[in-house]
Image: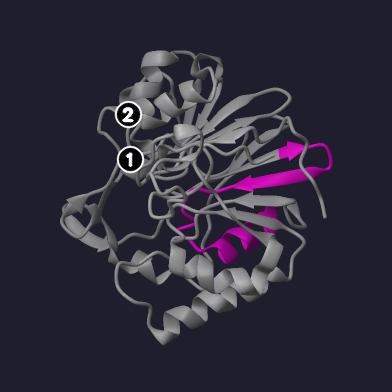
Amino acid sequence: MPTIPDSLFRFSFEDSLAYAVSSHQQIKPSGTGEEGCAFEHGLSLYIETEKHKILADTGATGAFAENAEKLGVDLSSVDMVVLSHGHYDHSGGILTFTEKNRHARIYMQQKATGDFYHGERYIGIDRRIPDLPQVEMIRGDRVLDGEVSLFSNITGRRCFPQSNLVLTRKINGKEQQDTFDHEQCLVIKEGKEQVLVSGCAHNGILNILDRYREIYGGMPARVISGFHMMKKTPYTEEEKSLILETAKELAEYETVFYTGHCTGDEAFALMKPVMGEKLVRLRSGVQVM
């Protein structure tokens, strides 16, 4: 099974924890993450490569910065921030980050500035973020250098997460179903292997992998992503079937999938027996590799 060099993924601060797990996937009785890290409903990953120190998302608040300090991670050394999509639980720490670091470029899709809602609740990014001088808006795919690239334009709808159906956007004052065309994925090349990092995989992890293969060919060695399968109400039989269908296809690959955040405990429990060691739960404060 492919491995990732220690230099690649150092720590992840998911849910403003430190490894990748959601606030709904607590692992310690005290309600804290590993190493005493805080948790919330959000996602933030710290990644080191040979050339870069990257933040993939910044959680819902500035709690990720406190976790970084506890883990000995110097946020002022980060040179790149990638926003996976235009929701608050991935962008909420950006303003805190820019107080500590004024040189890192912040890459986001231009469409991530939209008006996004969950029912009546606004769940989009802080309106001040697009005006930050560090922000660089992207339209579509972008190769940043030989190590790092971004892709979007994910249009497939196989096993589309049903929890997306309650999420909308307003365009010219009219509410419509969110198409998640503001979602982008990060790809990191390390030697002969590549790692795919997504936020929530709102477009569906299978569709993201289809788009990945279309661009890069083959499969990534590792995928770090939420699957956006979490629900507050019980799954229908159809929803369970879609989750199991997704797990069966993912299990066919040599890829190892690290998931948490919006995946949900129940979905993870359904997928784990199918995927075995190829499915790993992400937790706050834990070093991935």
Residue under label 2, please give it. Answer: 129
Q: Could you tell me if residue 212 is visible in this image?
A: yes
Q: Nearer the viewer, residue 220 or 105?
A: 220
Q: Residue furthest bottom?
A: 237
Decide: is 228 above or below 133: below
Q: Secondary structure at mark 2?
A: helix
Q: Are marks 1 and 2 in contact (CB under 8 Å)?
A: yes
Left/right placement of residue 10 relative to residue 153 reads right
Label 1 environment density (alpha carbons within 10 Å; few <14, some 14–19, many ≥20) = some
Disc 1 or 2, which lies upstream in sequence? 1
Vertical arrangement, residue 1 with respect to residue 156, above or below: above
In this rendering, is residue 272 above or below 24?
A: below
Which residues make up the magenta segment? Answer: 189-215
Q: Is residue 72 magenta?
A: no
Q: Is residue 123 left or right of residue 245?
A: left
> As rendered, which of 258 and 58 lies closer to the eye?
258
- The residue type indicated by label 2 comes to Ile
